[in-house]
Image (tube, rainbow, N blue to C red):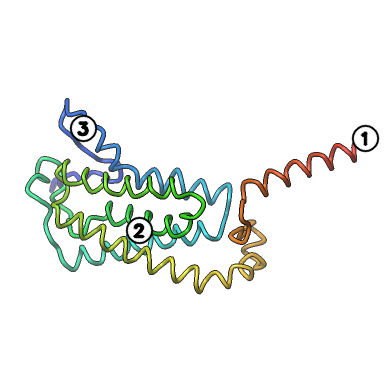
């Protein structure tokens, strides 16, 4: 019976040298895309169901699909350090982690820079740290992380343009569609301060309920 080599699930399979606190920190930084995807977009869809957020996440998925196509076509090997990390069975150019983070940073910045410039700045810092982590930990070469960052910036800007100059005009129809009504999908991009809007409406609803009870 043939014995096939084992392959790890690389989603959270990040290694660093024992005792290296910088590597430990950067290993957690490498997991930021996972936190954004699972803790951010999945939670957003469950509790918020905003069309802008849904299309933001869709753009990231398309970006990662493009990344896999390029990796399969180019087939550039990872650096020699991948032998210690059990990562030599996958291609390295461009870095999918960096592409993800810089797509996120560009789209998020273009979407929120007027109202949340500090948060937008944090996304760029995380992107740069992700580049550093992938090289420092030995998963990618410098050229691979820069290629991923550049591709992420380009795709993020293009997708933002497609969504907010074209698809956004169909958001009202999506809200009124059978799918939109069934899953309470909505668009609040026309509301200047969504947090205040929801806060005021929740208070008004509570006061209305109290007045009916009395």
Mark 1 / mark 2, whichever is N-terminal = 2
Q: Residues within 10 Å of mark 2 (few under 14, many from 20)?
A: many
- Disc number placed over residue 103 in the picture, else none: 2
Dividing the image into 4 quarters, which one contains the C terminus? top right
Residue 70, percent from left and from top: 23, 66
Mark 3 / mark 1, whichever is N-terminal = 3
**Marks 3 and 1, how far apart in space?**
61 Å
Task: Decide if residue 140 is on the left or right side of residue 203.
Answer: left
Q: Secondary structure at mark 3?
A: helix
Q: Residues within 10 Å of mark 1 (few under 14, many from 20)?
A: few
**Marks 3 and 2, how far apart in space?**
25 Å
Frontmost residue, 111 versus 99: 111
Proximity of marks 3 and 2: CB atoms separated by less than 8 Å: no
Q: Secondary structure at mark 2?
A: helix
Q: In the image, is residue 169 above or below residue 181? A: below
Q: Residues within 10 Å of mark 3 (few under 14, many from 20)?
A: few
Q: Secondary structure at mark 1?
A: loop
Residue farthest toward the left in the current orientation of the protein: 80
Proximity of marks 1 and 2: CB atoms separated by less than 8 Å: no
Task: Decide if residue 158 is on the left or right side of residue 195.
Answer: left
Q: Which residue is mark 3?
A: 22
Mark 3 / mark 2, whichever is N-terminal = 3
Task: Decide if residue 207 is on the left or right side of residue 197.
Answer: right
**Marks 1 and 2, how far apart in space?**
53 Å
Count up the numbered dots: 3
Frontmost residue, 113 versus 152: 113
Q: In the image, is residue 140 above or below residue 156? A: above
Q: Residue at x 52, y 71 (%)?
A: 167
Residue 14, percent from left and from top: 24, 39
Residue 40, percent from left and from top: 46, 46
Residue farthest toward the top in the current orientation of the protein: 19
Q: Which residue is mark 1?
A: 214
């Amino acid at each position: 019976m043939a014995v096939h080599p084992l392959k790890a699930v690389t989603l959270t399979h990040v290694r660093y040298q024992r005792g290296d606190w910088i590597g430990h920190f950067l290993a957690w930084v490498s997991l930021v895309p996972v936190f954004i995807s699972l803790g951010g977009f999945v939670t957003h869809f469950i509790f918020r169901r905003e069309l802008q957020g849904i299309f933001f996440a869709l753009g990231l998925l398309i970006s990662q699909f493009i990344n896999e196509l390029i990796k399969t076509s180019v087939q550039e090997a990872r650096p020699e350090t991948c032998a210690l990390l059990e990562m030599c069975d996958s291609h390295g150019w461009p870095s999918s982690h960096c592409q993800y983070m810089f797509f996120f940073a560009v789209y998020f910045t273009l979407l929120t820079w007027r109202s949340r410039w500090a948060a937008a700045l944090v996304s760029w810092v995380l992107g740069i740290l992700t580049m550093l982590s992938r090289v420092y930990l030995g998963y990618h070469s410098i050229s691979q992380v820069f290629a991923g960052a550049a591709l992420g910036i380009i795709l993020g800007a293009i997708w933002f343009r497609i969504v907010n100059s074209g698809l956004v005009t169909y958001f009202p129809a999506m809200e009124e569609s059978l799918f939109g009504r069934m899953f309470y999908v909505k668009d609040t991009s026309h509301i200047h301060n969504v947090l205040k809007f929801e806060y005021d409406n929740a208070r008004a609803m509570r006061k209305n309920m109290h007045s009916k009870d009395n």
